[in-house]
Amino acid sequence: MPEGHTIHRLAAEHRRVFAGRAIRAESPQGRFAAGARQIDGRVLREADAHGKHLLLGFDDDRWLHVHLGIYGKYAFGPVPAPAPVGAVRLRLTGADAHADLRGPNTCELLDPVDVKALHARLGPDPLRPDADPDLAWRRISRSHTSVAALLMDQSVVAGVGNIYRAEVLFRQGIAPATPGRELTRERWEAVWADLAALMAEGVRAGRIDTVREEHTPEAMGRPPRVDDHGGEVYVYRRSGMPCLVCGTEVRTESLVGRNLFYCPGCQPG
DNA sequence: CTTCTATGGCAAG
DNA sequence: TTGCCCTAGAAGC
């Protein structure tokens, strides 16, 4: 679920459903009881996303900061909301919808100074109009770290997760182990542009699709992919299967505790 | 039942 | 690098 496109969708959904009106807040699970009491009855003024961080601004100038981590989830539904199922950390209820938050890595209240600091420690987000890709380029072009690790570093680029990382490197034909400083500026600009397009499409569709027209299931006469994230991809979780472009077996290896997927044929080096 | 896994990120060593 | 946190569903007995 939660790469940057998911969080931008959640921000839009909160805006659409809750903004401008007082909401009720509670913590059925109890772990955010004190925070929920402080939000309860407030008006939601704005909803913002920076990378994988969701920020909800309330009328007392405080912000709810949510980070889903690897298994956090939101579930929106109608009112009246049914009795909560499972570990619901936070339930927001508005005039005609409710939102249940389960399993977040972070769920806390921040003041404007904290929010500013949060933005400052995050790199440019390809989904934000104010993003400056040169800030990322300055880090990447001086780094001996692999481009695969740099793309997952949220202080370099915000919002890219394991799927977009693997897929953009595949689409750009870049070997994951390539040190940042060996990328040319042109290559980086292509990566950034591709991320911006792929992630914008992810926001629109609500899933991650990265295969080009000529490699879709219809075009290739292959069965559609069925996976949790629901999208058509080139390498993510396709290890052992033939590359859709060159037929080489897709490989996986562990990098900084995460599975990295790539095609040795299309991403030589 | 139990164990494993996941689209994250942090602190400790 | 390892361990730990958060949760739910799938996979393995």
Image (cartoon, coloured by chain):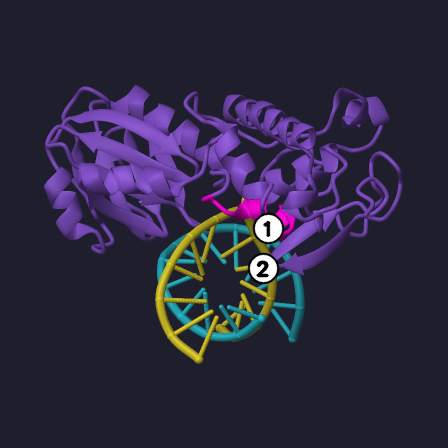
Chain colours: A purple, B yellow, C cyan
Q: Is residue A218 left or right of residue A89?
A: right
In the rendered image, residue A205, in percent from the top left (x then y), is placed at 55, 23
Q: Is residue A148 magenta?
A: yes
The answer to whether dots 1 and 2 both sit on one chain is: yes
> Element type at marker 1?
helix
Q: What amino acid is found at the position of numbered circle 1 in the picture? A: Ala
- Label 1, label 2: how far apart the Cα atoms are: 8 Å
User: Label 1: how many residues lie within 10 Å, few (<14), some (14-19) or many (20+)?
Assistant: many
Circle 2: residue type: Val
| SS label for mark 2 | loop
Chain of the residue where label 1 is placed in the rendered structure: A
Q: Which residue is rendered at x = 14% and y = 38% of the image?
A: A39
Q: Which residue is mark 2?
A: A256
What segment is highlighted magenta in the picture? A144-155
A240 up-or-down from A131: above or below: below
Q: Position of residue A16 (x, y in %)?
A: 31, 20
Q: Chain of mark 2?
A: A
- Crowding near the residue tagged with mark 2, few <14, some 14–19, many ≥20 C-alpha atoms within 10 Å: few
| Image quadrant assignment for residue A17 | top left
Q: Earlier in the sequence, mark 1 or mark 2?
A: 1
Pick the front one: A69 or A100: A69
Q: Position of residue A144 (x, y in %)?
A: 63, 52
Q: Which residue is mark 1?
A: A149
In this picture, residue A168 sits left or right of residue B13:
right
Of residue A12 and residue A100, the one placed in the foreground of this image is A12
| Residues at discs 1 and 2 in contact (Cβ within 8 Å) | yes
In depth, the one of A91 and A146 nearer the eye is A146
Residue A125 seen by the camera: yes
Q: Which mark is residue A188?
A: none
Judge whether residue A68 is colored magenta: no
Q: What residue do we see at 14% from left, 32% from top?
A: A61
Q: Is residue A78 visible?
A: no
